[in-house]
Amino acid sequence: MALRKCPDCGKEMSTNATKCPHCGYKDKFTQVAILVLILLVIGIIIGVIWYFSYEKHLNDLSNTVKQTSLYSR
Ligand SMILES: [Zn+2]
């Protein structure tokens, strides 16, 4: 079993270990994968909120247009 140094604490850890057994440092790939996943979820949530608020804004706008056209008559 090959060993490599942990980039965080400098102690030896297995090359095929995804996590350092000493300090709990996670492999860069795992960190990036988790980060991308979190960003993706946040992006989807923001997208859904933006979509619904935009739709509401459009409804408000069409209501205002209706009201102004009523008053102008
Ligand atoms: Zn470590």
Image (spheres, grey):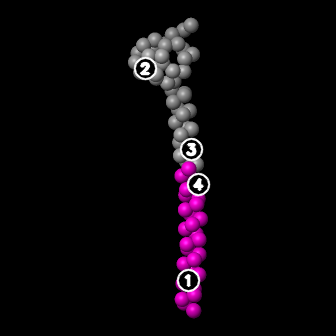
Q: Tell me the residue that label 4 is attached to.
A: 48
Against 38, is 71 above or below?
Answer: below
Please state, as top left, top right, bottom left or bottom right, where the N terminus lies in the image. Answer: top right
The kind of residue on which mark 2 rests is: Cys
CA gap, disc 1 and disc 2: 65 Å
Q: Tell me the residue that label 1 is attached to.
A: 67
CA gap, disc 1 and disc 3: 39 Å
Against 28, is 36 above or below?
Answer: below
Q: Residue furthest top?
A: 1
The kind of residue on which mark 4 rests is: Val
User: In the drawing, what numbered circle is on residue 41?
Assistant: 3
Crowd band around label 4 with a 10 angstrom C-alpha radius: few (<14), some (14–19), many (20+): few
- Magenta stretch encompasses residue 52: yes
Residue at the image position 54 percent from the left and 52 percent from the top: 46
Q: Assign a secondary structure to mark 2.
A: loop
Where are the magenta residues, as a range?
A: 45-73
Q: Tell me the residue that label 2 is attached to.
A: 23
Q: Is residue 63 left or right of residue 23?
A: right
- Magenta stretch encompasses residue 57: yes
